[in-house]
Amino acid sequence: MPQGPRCIESHGTDPYTNLAIESCLMRSVQPGEPILYLWQNERTVVIGRNQCASAECNLSQLERDGGHLARRRSGGGAVYHDLGNLNFTFVTTAKEYDQTAQTDVILDAVCALGFQAERTGRNDLVLEGGRKFSGHAYQHTGSASCHHGTIMVSVDVDALGRYLNVSPSKLQTKGVRSVRSRVTNLQAVRPDISVATLKEALRSAYAKYVGHAVEVEDASELDAAEVEAARQHFASREWLFRGERLFDESRKGRFAWGEARIDLTCDQGIICDLVVFSDGLDAERIDAIPKLLSGVPKRAEDVEERLLAGGFPTDMAVNIAQLIAN
């Protein structure tokens, strides 16, 4: 019998273990057992599934400071985690996934603490005045879905500025001069707010959402061997630096669906190797581009035709085709 909604907390701060736990929860989630998972990482830059690690993060500075680079399985952009940040993850079966309701749990918790907050853009929550305090990303497999994000309570924003390499074009679209000027902590509005206070508010909002109180489980009670196997994947160089190799050509563009960098090598006008780095939220579709375009002539009409045949939205197919054809 289903045991009902679950709330799971990790008390460790190793990013690879915490991402492994999330992955294991996605594999094991059952119908009627939605999960709220709360976790924290210490001094970590987490990049999106399709991003280029060396382009998004000041790796040398991060390593000198004893920090970690991690890559999640969802799309979106790079974020900085420290112990002033609380991460949340909603894990459900694909049929029970409700992004709007899950976002409302976060908003209800924050508003219950006295903040005026709202959702904006693709995946952000902002306080009054438009400054971002929470960014969200999403992952969908055949049977499970994940909605996760950050909530900034007392993050070291100077460190955030040191470690993240945010493109000028992205900042221009947000109307700001630096990533630090775009974000804010909850403590900047209410200095008495803590991560513990926020956790309590989230648990209460989640209980309201599912209709009853939910006992908190410790993530250490999960299958240790399964978690460790997943951890090895998330900590591997193959995963952290996936797609990074030498190509003959590289070009960049920014579109409504996200920023993209395409590196490619051609032989007599035919695409023979290609990788796409992007902060787009549709990670699975972006992952499919190299296989779809292998062997295709590097002409806009041929690239667009192949992407459309592969189920891509028209605007995305046109953007990528024009970028590749230059």
Image: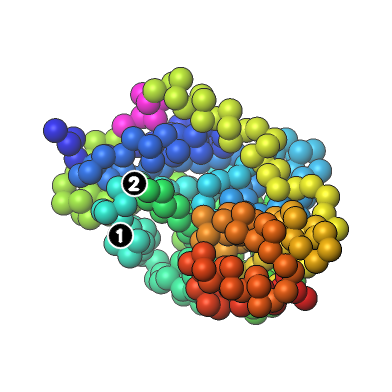
Residue under circle 2?
A: 143
Residue type indicated by callout 1: Asp
Task: Report if residue 58 is visible in the image.
Answer: yes
Q: Nearer the viewer, residue 10 or 51?
A: 51
x and y percentages locating residue 216 in the rendered image = 29, 35
Q: Which mark is residue 98?
A: 1
User: Around disc 2, counting alpha carbons within 10 Å, would you say few (fewer than 14), some (14 to 19), or many (20 or more)?
Assistant: some
Q: Nearer the viewer, residue 45 or 299?
A: 299
Image quadrant holding the N terminus, namely top left
Residues drawn in magenta: 217-222
Residue sticking out furthest to the top: 225
Residue 114 falls within the magenta-colored stretch = no
Q: Is residue 103 left or right of residue 156?
A: left
x and y percentages locating residue 25 in the rendered image = 38, 37
Say what secondary structure mark 1 lies in.
loop
Task: Report if residue 76 is visible in the image.
Answer: no
Residue type indicated by callout 2: Ser
Marks 2/1 in contact by CB < 8 Å: the verdict is no
Q: Which mark is residue 273?
A: none
Mark sitting earlier along the chain (2/1): 1
Q: Which quadrant of the figure has residue 63?
A: top right
x and y percentages locating residue 76 in the rendered image = 56, 59
Q: Is residue 55 left or right of residue 41?
A: right
x and y percentages locating residue 321 in the rendered image = 66, 73
